[in-house]
Image (spheres, grey):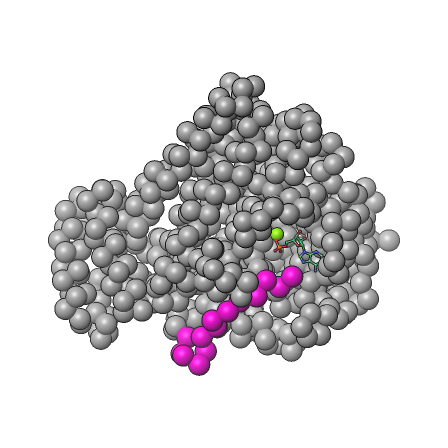
Amino acid sequence: MTSFHLDLENSYTELPDVFFTKQPPTPVQKPEVVIFNEKLADQVGLNFSQSSKGEMAKLLSGNLVLEGMQPFAQAYAGHQFGNFTMLGDGRAVVLGEHLTPSGQRLDLQFKGSGRTPYSRGGDGRAALGPMLREYIISEAMHYLGIPTTRSLAVVATGETVYRENELPGAILTRIAGSHIRVGTFEFASLHDDKSITLALLDYLIDRHFPEIKEMNNQPLALLEAMIEQQAELITDWMRVGFIHGVMNTDNMALSGETIDYGPCAFMDSFDPATVFSSIDRNGRYSYSNQPYIAQWNLARLAESLIPLIHQEREEAIGMAENALNAFEEVYKCKWLAMMGSKLGLLEAKKEDEKLITELLDWMHQSSADFTNTFRDFCKPDLPDEEAYLSENFQNWHTRWQLRLEKEEQGLDSSLSLMRSVNPAVIPRNHKVEEALQAGEKGDFNPLQNLLKALENPYEGGDLLTPYQTPPKPSEKVLQTFCGT
Ligand code: AMP
Ligand code: MG
């Protein structure tokens, strides 16, 4: 018997049966908690204080399924690198939905918890390194103020997973607003019955967008809301130099959260064509392609909604196309405002675009560090660095200063605006790798120190210094891997 009590709901399993399969996690040999997010548990009102370490390990590995829990794997489809595929949770189960004290409904999901009917050829398992990687990056994103799924715990399974090498196995507990993806709608629309898509639409609107319930054309209103939301999310990614790496439609969550941290990474020196993922050979998901891909993915969502938007197909297509065409402008406005704020401008204007693109061109040509350059700009005086002495940069800098003088709010306000959007620290790849490698050998100190440094990214301070230096050539991580 456990002293732990967890009341989970299962609203998702009231959807038509096609959307899920009830599936318990597969028990593991020797579960041990590697990391547990106490702050997050407190924040969402999950109280584990009554349970022993052993109980926590059993619970967070799926070795113990509490009475009333009905874990299930979700069905979905998706476009992976542009190609349509049937997918589904091949190594994940949703344990259920937890209601926070403030009434928010959150999915608790295991990743790496064994095979499901959607596993295809996979073993249903995950390795420790990639699960810790998701933990680090998702927490970093949260503290950077970017919507994201969160990580509650990583438990080592005591089992070996077989990839190119033999690796220690692990299970991640993820917390998310929900796990409904563009690919869930693609899956729904495959059925020759539009009530299936309608059920999903109603569910999504009830759970995340109750205001849409009042609207006349709900599927169209949802599409418009998604355009706004994804444009906002991608703008946030661009602000901090984040590259998701696998923006397949099954990895775009309609809760608006960044989801599925695989080969994602943050850029060190600025290059718009940056790609880290080993499987992204054509740069489809490069830094600067992310907004285009978001729009492409939203077009797949729109296609799934066509039969619900209007009875006449042609009419529906016209309406969806109109909505989708707005993405570019919506994104551009958000991007301009965001880049303006990185330069201390309260309201960037169309004319400011040139100042911004010239800076980015200079950063690209001189391989300037994306994070540190903008953080240097937050200081009253630029540091004495060679790159800033070049004539090219000095000319730009003079023009920027003249532009800043036109801001009504004064320099101090501009600087504090800049400090609130330009992080002093990001999870640099080489530091993440260092922490993961130590973790795989059983030393979790570098991981804990890194996580601590990432908790206050906008504040600066001495604690951050070891994490601010760009990698030396020998430390550079050029490729990241999916971790599947
Ligand atoms: P991802 O690239 O992580 O979004 O995964 C794409 C799909 O592959 C999802 O349906 C996953 O559930 C599935 N998948 C990834 N790794 C495994 C695995 N080891 N075993 C079974 N399915 C997997
Ligand atoms: Mg995925």
What secondary structure do most residues of the magenta stretch adopt?
loop
Q: Identify which residue is drawn at 25% across, 42% down.
A: 347
What residue is shown at x 21% (from left), y 51% (from top)? 354
Residue at image point 21% right, 47% down: 352
Viewer-proximal residue among 208 and 465: 208
The relative height of residue 426 versus residue 219 in the rendered view (above or below) is below
Please tell me whether residue 43 is drawn above or below residue 383 in the rendered image: above
Q: Is 287 a magenta residue?
A: no
In the rendered view, does 473 fall on the left or right side of 176? Answer: left
Give the magenta range.
471-484
Q: Residue furthest right?
A: 1
| Residue 35 percent location from the top left of the image | 64, 64
Where the C terminus falls, by quadrant?
bottom right
Does the segment drawn in magenta span residue 476? yes
Image position of 237 (left or right of 86):
left
Between 237 and 101, the one lying in front of the other is: 237
